[in-house]
Amino acid sequence: MNEIKIFSPATIANISCGFDVLGCCLEAIGDEMIIKKSNTKGIQITKIIGEDLPLETDKNVAGVAALTLLAHLNFEIDFGFEIEIYKNIKPGSGIGSSAASAAGAVFALNELLNKPFSKTELVAFACEGERLACGSPIADNVAPAIFGGFTLVKSTQPLKIIELPTLDGLYTTIIHPQIEIRTADARAVLPTKIDLDAAVKQWANVGSLIHALHTNDHELFADSLTDFIVEPHRSKLIPDFDLVKQSALKAGALGCGISGSGPSIFTFSKTLQDAENVSNSIRKIYSKNNIPFHIYISEINTKGIKIKI
Ligand code: ADP
């Protein structure tokens, strides 16, 4: 195989209670990438369509992640790779734009090299792309992009990813207000110390959310989707967050929270009909505030990155 075309999905990180550790993979939103073997050694990014992003290998997360993979082969292959990126996920949206490019690049290289690396190793390489995007090698978006479904980053040193089951029939409705919140700013509003009571409630929620996924318990899942630590600070950066949350829950959502570092807001629903009702209720609120927005509805993608040809 000399060429591969892939769909590299958007992802939701944190999922309310699981700051920096939980994530899930989306079916309906994602980038496309074409990766070709080339006679020129190393990595060239030859095309980016849809967004204004750097073509320089060391300034693009796809290039940095791919170079990290090649470094683990000691650059001992006598060909290189060309990467084309077709962006549908806006950078800075909070639904894993940089993660899709970083994860997609290393997944595709691994396929073209006959899979020398495990999924966990691919996550580690993709994390180096994330380091370029946000300053730290966070795995909570790249892990679900590569593994699919829900994932838990059990530890980063050494990197351990746990694959979790998903709930039957789960849909997400996501609103992406077209404002920019830099990951660095979203991190700057967080407290450096946390209250013990809040921490106790939070880790109870992480445990019960994982139990809910294993037992297909939608009610417990809904009851676990509360963030006592991060959301109270970050939600202030997102216009009308509280109104959106109230109306989504009233329209039948199982839960609602900030996707990654925002500004996107995610909700989960039990059925497509509920997801559409939630979408309509959020649309009404955002139509009043003059901020342009996109709304997406998606199932959970249990496979992760998909090969298209
Ligand atoms: P997101 O959570 O949507 O990935 P981040 O703020 O974490 O948003 O990452 C976006 C940053 O990464 C932007 O500064 C963007 O310029 C940079 N970047 C570099 N290469 C890419 C790429 N291929 N796709 C998306 N963002 C990229």
Image (cartoon, rainbow, N blue to C red):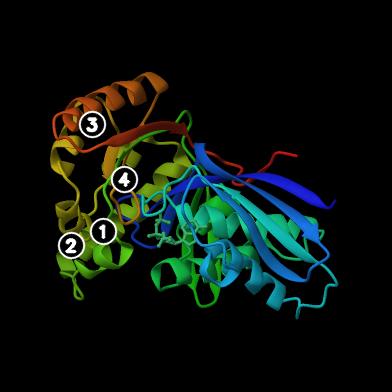
The residue tagged 3 is 248
Q: Is residue 161 above or below residue 269?
A: below
* Residue projecting furthest to the top: 273
Q: How far is the residue under mark 4 from the one under mark 1?
A: 22 Å
Relative side of 215 to 122, left or right: left
Disc number for residue 198: 2
Cα distance between the residues tagged 3 and 1: 22 Å
Q: Are marks 3 and 2 in contact (CB under 8 Å)?
A: no
Tell me how far mark 3 sits from mark 2, CA to CA.
Answer: 24 Å
For the residues labelled 2 and 4, the Cα–Cα distance comes to 24 Å
Q: Quadrant of ligand 1?
A: bottom left
Query: Crowding near pointer 3: few (<14 within 10 Å), some, many (20+)?
Result: many
Mark nearer the viewer, 4 or 1: 4
Q: Earlier in the sequence, mark 3 or mark 1?
A: 1
Q: What SS does tag 3 mark? A: helix
Spatial distance from mark 1 to mark 2, Cα to Cα? 6 Å
Q: Which residue is mark 4?
A: 264
12 versus 156 height, above or below = above
Q: Amino acid at mark 4?
A: Ser
Q: Position of residue 23 (x, y in %)?
A: 44, 52
Identify the residue at image location x=75%, y=39%: 309
Relative to residue 180, is residue 37 drawn left or right? Answer: right
Mark 4 vs mark 3, CA separation in Å: 14 Å
First of labels 4, 1 by sequence position: 1
For image coordinates 19% across by 75% down, the residue present is 193
Label 1 residue SS: helix
Q: From the viewer's perspective, is the residue at label 4 or at label 3 nearer?
A: 4
Looking at the image, do the residues carrying marks 4 and 1 touch, with CB atoms under 8 Å apart? no
